[in-house]
Structure formats: structure tokens, C-alpha cells
Image (cartoon, helix red, strand yellow):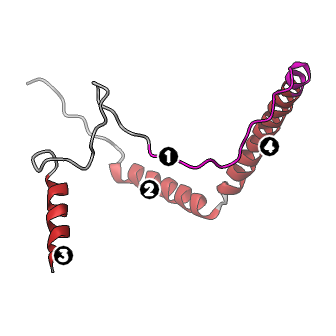
Amino acid sequence: EGLTVRRSLQPVWTALLVIAFVLFVLDLAMRRVAFDRWVAQAREETLAVTREARTDQMRAAFASRQQARAGAEPVPEMDRSAKPRTKASVTDAVGEPERRDEVSESDNPLLAAKRRARSKMENE
């Protein structure tokens, strides 16, 4: 009681219409203007600066490597010829050789099924 009801002299739809028009123009501008050219150009400039800095770092690293090699003793050549491989025996904690082909069916059921299939094929 005692409160006055306030009324707006301007309808809301005019403000909404103006906002919609501004958003429409912005949408058209975003679709028509090639902003990606400016972004790509800025990215290329950034990449060029980064590339130049990395090149300077690599030159400094190469120069320090050359200095280190100049002051270091020569390293004897290694024998890089191919050597025949031998089977290394696997030993358990006690030091006795472990047999890998003796796996029980409870340890690995897949290996057990594989053995059964192989023996079945050999029998046929």
C-alpha cells in the first residue's frame, strides 16, 4: 500500500532491436573481414623471432661443444662389428637355471590351451 506503480516511457523492444542490429552487423563483419590474415601475420612474426632465438641457442651450443672437444682427450675407437648373440640363461634367486617352458596350467591358462591345440594338430 502506498507504493506507486512505475511505467517505462520507452518500450523494451526498441532496445532489443538495436542490440540485435548491432550483433547482426558484428556477425557480418566477422564473416566477411579476413581477420585470420592479421592473426597469421602476427603468428609468422612470432615464429620468426622464436626461430631466430633457437638458431642463436644452437650456434652457442655448437660453439661450446667444439670448445669442449678441442680441449678433451681423443676417445679410442670402439669395435662396432656385429657379434653373434648367445642365449642368456635365466637364473632364479637361488642361482639355478629357470626353465621357462615348464609352466603349469594354473600359472598361465593361455599357454596351456596353446599347448593342447598344438598337440591336437600334431596328432591329426
> What numbered label is drawn on residue 48?
4
Q: Is residue 120 magenta?
A: no
The location of residue 61, given as percent across then percent down, is 81, 28
Q: Assign a secondary structure to mark 4.
A: helix
Q: Residue drawn 25% across and 50% down?
A: 101
Discs 1/4, front: 1
- Label 1: which secondary element: loop
N-term-proximal mark, 2 vs 4: 2
SS at circle 2: helix
Label 1 and label 2: CA atoms lie apart by 80 Å
The secondary element bearing badge 3 is classed as: helix
Foreground disc of the pair 1, 2: 1
Three-letter amino acid code of the residue under disc 4: Ala
At label 1, the amino acid type is Thr
Q: Is 117 left, or right, of 89 in this rendering?
A: left
Instruction: Name the residue at 26% across, 39% down.
Output: 7
Give the mark nearest the N terminus, 1 or 2: 2
Percent position of residue 58, x then y = 81, 33
Magenta residues, as a range?
66-87
Q: Which residue is mark 2?
A: 20
Q: Residues within 10 Å of mark 3 (few under 14, many from 20)?
A: few
Q: Please tell me the numbered disc located at residue 86.
A: 1
- Report the residue marked by disc 3: 121
Where is the C terminus found, in terms of image quarters? bottom left
